[in-house]
Amino acid sequence: MLHRDVQDALELIGGRWRGAIMASVCGSPKRFVELKSDLHPITSRVLTKELRYLEQNKLIIVEYGNGAKNAVCYAHSEHGKSCAPVILQLREWAVKHRKLMLETLRREH
């Protein structure tokens, strides 16, 4: 069923932060502090919870640097990389939708 498949996908990357986290790591791995900055006003607690969820669902991985304690980065897993085209398409749609909404608002006022 089409609607069930879409519902399952949105469960994984939907919500306020998961899709944004996935989009944030699309270009390159990010450190926790970079993600927190990109996703302002997300709290550290919520970011940690969502990163764990995405890691448990095999969408992101934790990369450890050269042994330095703070060299932890978050990146798409191989499975998560397969979601990147969807995220980029969603971004394109959002930009078009935003333009349409702004045009509609201008006409109404």
Image (cartoon, rainbow, N blue to C red):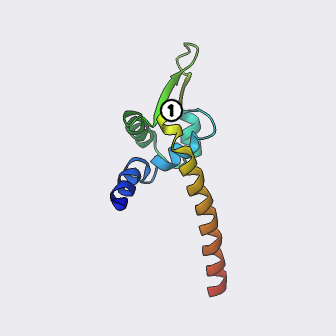
Q: Amino acid at mark 1?
A: Glu
Q: Residue furthest front?
A: 1
From the viewer's perspective, tell me whether residue 69 is left or right of residue 96: left
Q: Position of residue 19 (x, y in %)?
A: 49, 49
Q: Position of residue 34 (x, y in %)?
A: 59, 37
Q: Nearer the viewer, residue 68 or 61?
A: 61
Residue visible at 44% across and 48% down in the picture: 13
Residue 107's place in the image compared with 29, above or below, is: below
Tell me, yes or no, if residue 29 can be seen here. yes
Q: Nearer the viewer, residue 92 or 20?
A: 92
From the viewer's perspective, tell me whether residue 15 is left or right of residue 65: left
Q: Residue furthest top?
A: 67
Residue 109's place in the image compared with 73, above or below, is: below
Q: Specify few, some or many for label 1: CA neighbours under 10 Å numbering under 14, 14-19, or 20 or more.
A: few
Residue visible at 40% across and 51% down in the picture: 9
**In the rendered image, which quarter is residue 45 located in?**
top left
Residue 102's place in the image compared with 8, above or below, is: below
Residue visible at 38% across and 37% down in the picture: 57
Q: Position of residue 107 (x, y in %)?
A: 66, 85
Q: Nearer the viewer, residue 59 or 72?
A: 59
**In the rendered image, which quarter is residue 68 located in?**
top right
Q: Nearer the viewer, residue 87 or 14?
A: 87
Quarter holding the N terminus?
A: bottom left
**In the rendered image, which quarter is residue 96 located in?**
bottom right
Quarter holding the C terminus?
A: bottom right
Q: Position of residue 35 (x, y in %)?
A: 55, 39
Q: Which residue is mark 1?
A: 78
Residue visible at 48% across and 47% down in the picture: 42
